[in-house]
Image (cartoon, coloured by chain):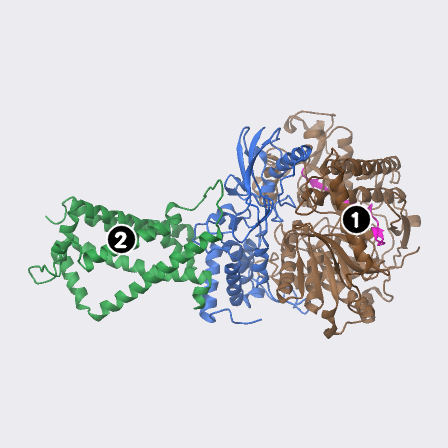
Chain colours: A green, B brown, C blue
Amino acid sequence: MTLIKNMVGRKIVMSITGLALVSFVCIHLLGNISLFSGPDGINAYAKMLHSLGPFLWVVRLIMAAALGLHMVFGILLTLENRTSRAQKYAVNKHLSATVAGKNMIWTGLLIALYLGYHLLHFTGQMIMPEFSSSRNLDALGRPDVFSMVVHSFQHTVVSVVYVTAMAAVGLHLSHGLQSMVQTLGLNNERTLPVMVKVGAAAALVLFLGYAAIPAGIVSRLVGR
Amino acid sequence: MILDGKSPSGPLAEKWDRRRQELKLVNPANKRRYKILVVGTGLAGASAAATLGELGYTVEAFCFQDSPRRGHSIAAQGGINAAKNYPNDGDSIYRLFYDTVKGGDFRAREANVYRLAMLSNNIIDQCVAQGVPFARDYAGYLDNRSFGGAQVSRTFYARGQTGQQLLLGAYGALSRQIHAGTVRLYPRTEMLDLVVINGHAKGITIRDLTTGAIRSHTGDAVCLCTGGYGNVFYLSTNAMGSNVTATYRAYKKGAFFANPCFTQIHPTCIPVTGDHQSKLTLMSESLRNDGRVWVPKKKADERKPHEISEDERDYFLERKYPSFGNLAPRDIASRAAKEVCDEGRGVGPGGRGVYLDFADAIQRLGKDKISERYGNLFEMYEKITAENAYDRPMRIYPAPHYTMGGLWVDYNLQSNIPGLYVLGEANFSDHGANRLGASALMQGLADGYFIISYTIADYLARTGPGSASADHAEFLRSIGEVDAASKKLLSINGRRTVNDFHRELGRIMWEHVGMARRRESLELALKRIPELRAEFWSNVRVPGSGADLNQELEKAGRVADFLEFGELMALDALLREESCGGHFRVEHQMPDGEAKRDDDNFCYVAAWEFRGVGKKPELHKEPLTFEHIPLATRSYK
Amino acid sequence: MDLTLFVWRQRGQLDKGRLEQYAARNISPDMSFLEMLDTVNEGLIAEGREAIAFDHDCREGICGMCSQVINGIPHGPQEKTTVCQLHMRHFKDGDTIYIEPWRAKAFPVIRDLIVDRSSLDRIIQSGGYASVHTGGVPDANAVLVPKQDVDIAMDAAECIGCGACVAACPNGAAMLFTAAKVTHLAMLPQGRVEAARRVCVMTETMLREGFGSCSNHYECQAVCPKGIKVSFIAKLNREYLKSFMGNPGCSTGE
């Protein structure tokens, strides 16, 4: 409790939950790019995940908790910070704050919206149920995730939504990663500028990695 | 009246111990029943308030700034002296004592100075324990440097911000007591009167600078720690708010003002650029270690410095003082600079500046070496003047820097008004006619941390707590007077601004009561100051109201006091028919231009008693005796 | 040169306040920014109007009293320079200059450009010191301190407490100010003893005083006139974590 009563404590909660979420984002990407090796890659991956059984649910619950905390504190801190600087300057010049940094709440909310859509789409499979992997099995009897993804992303609109959401994730992380390192007190004078760059680069890599999938499908490089 | 400084008897080294033995103590259980008012929160005030609060007294601390961390002690750059003798180079308490008495040109009280030298060591211990980040060597020991021409390295320093670090240490100690509830802080509060009841200091009247409210605070004793009066010159290295008001109003209530003419002028300040100038910035004296001071031989020479050939330059310090050259003491270097400018050979805007040239040093040692030694000073100079001192000589000019004079106090730091104590630069006691470099910080902290707690207890134990009542007629009268003065200032509605008067007063003081004083000029000042004062009270314009924050009104009150105080200073300078330390009378000099002291007639402290505005104050003398250091003439030839 | 000024005027905390336009004429490039305002004020007084109130004292960049946001930047456009050390040669004839007070919930405006920064004092009062009594301390050289540590402590201790970091922070946070004090004392053996409790109570005071939290934008570092580094904020966070692991909840008592 004391942790969340202290403003540094709250930021540390943000960092640790952020770290959990970004770890998930990384692992998720590693899983997703198995799509590039065709149906065998991703469908095997999906089967493996399902075989984890209760463990999968443990991970899901942890992620849900991390997400919940991250969102609650993110919104709370944003509201608090706004009241701390209620009156605006007539002229306001930022010297080092970035677009990404200033819009964390908006990219965050966008990601939350997208996440709802994404879960309904690929996890709950209530959007475009005709491609549902739980209903359509591949030749080896595994859920056909590959076809579900490829068919979904062949709709340009869907791809655009996904790429846009990934841009939001990228922006969010381009500030969030370095911010996390700083809040956890892992920086010194030398590492700080490096971390700012590394954070941004890592965010870019994640964005490109994720965006590559719909891009590959729309451009017909994948799924033919 | 012959004043008694109440120095303890006995051998020099035992005096302070002996006095502490004689002083009464206050019962610990009773301490909180005594209320002490501490005015000012620079080094002296913050350390005093913290120490007294820690002992259990009820303390109220006042400062006109928004935070106690902003007292002008913060601007001291160089360092703080202590007789630690860490470098093993021959220093001792006695040597620091000797240097201070001699540096003060034999116008300080021996016993006080010895105590100061003794306590200097405790100060360093105390500050280190507080976490003051003094410079250290690679082995982790404290580092020392030699400062202001001292022959031993006894100066402790924290980069170029020693005053800041010491003040933040004292501010930390004070903050701790505020948190503990023993000290109550009143920032943005200015003391405007001292309340004296039956001859004892029993409170002060203040103005809350935010709301404009005027009210009194009662106390069992009052400590004034309100700094010096250098701003009587308008332009000085003091902060804009530094003023004489607290000490001057105590003077008007009967406290004696001692040696007001002892002021120190610092030779290496950045020159004035025009009438808009509001203050002067000091640069460390260490610059003179490598810079050569010169002016053109020709009058009003408008050429650029590099166009003036070597034989057309006058290296006047090297010429006049061949053995000390550019390192001649502060007062001598300052006076020499003013003389050449008065001859019309000054450089820069208005001809009020001399060159401090590093070309030779750069050639000899290389630019890197010079930048290593003075890089930050060169940067500061460039920030203010936009000139690069690596390429062209710096311009410097002397500026008022420190005031040795102040309210008269005895050995216990008590003024002639019982219950009124005066600490730090606000008193007169330890520096005589001239202060050594790195000694101001030492004095402020010695007074606040280590002296006042003993001596004030003696007074309190003798008087008993809670003797003052806020409804006493004196308090009501004091509030009435302060209120009337403020209303008067607001009602004049004349044509000139407060700054305008201050500027003119400063010009009079600088020209006639400045570095080199002569009878005619002092008499002229004594004629012109009252005239200016009369005009002030009929022609000043102070807009706004007294019922809220009004910076013009604050300034007006301070300038009104300077307009009276300047007269006292000129009078003191006129009557001291000798030259000593920072006080130089043109009539009294050696054939070579050195100060000529007159120990037969002036080996005393001149303490002035107020007799009414425009009336001649009464002079009281405290004779100075030198039992341990024989009176000697200093020579820097 | 001639300038157009838009200056924030506000009579008191209850007044809403507004920008007012003034002309500054015949300004010399050698003037400091505050001397320029002095000149404007002299003119206002001559016209019988009230002078613009602004905080200032030492005018040599060390007392930390001056506090103005000039064209959107606390202390103005010159790097590592307080307003009092900013000179008019950095402006051009005909320039328009906006002058506003520090803005933060924890810094209510008292009048015009003057704000109440006593919240910073209260952060220090809650624990920004080494709890040492006067007297009874060991010899100054009894405890050795590595030079590297003292140098870092001094870098942090140079903070002048002006509050520009708060004014620049989009969250009105006082993290750089607090981090500087926490670091200064945590680097020295004399301050180390209380480090855990100090960081805890000082950060709690920040929250109580209405300061925001740190979003790592580093605006504070960009405007700090003394070049205090945000790496000290990382140090504060580290100290906080250490403190939390050791004893959650600042419960060390007085």
Question: Badge 2: how crowded within 10 Å, few (<14), some, or many (20+)?
Answer: some
Residue at x 71%, y 43% (from the top left corner): B553
Q: Amino acid at mark 1?
A: Asn
| Percent x, y of residue B500 | 73, 35
- Chain of residue at mark 1: B
Residues behind callouts 2 and 1 on a single chain: no
Residue at x 30%, y 55% (from the top left corner): A112
In front of the other: B531 or B548: B548
In the drawing, does residue A38 fall left or right of residue A114? left
- Secondary structure at numbered mark 2: helix
Residue beneath disc 2: A114
Residue C157, quarter of the rendered image: bottom right
Residue B444 seen in this snapshot: yes
Residue B324, quarter of the rendered image: top right
Start and end of the magenta stretch? B252-270
Q: Nearer the viewer, mark 2 or mark 1?
A: 2
Residue B434, disc: 1
Residue at x 72%, y 75% (from the top left corner): B29
- Secondary structure at numbered mark 1: loop
| Percent x, y of residue B32 | 71, 70
In front of the other: B427 or B310: B427
Work out whether C64 lies above or below B492. below
Label 2, label 1: how far apart the Cα atoms are: 76 Å
Marks 2 and 1 in Cβ contact (< 8 Å):
no
- Chain of residue at mark 2: A
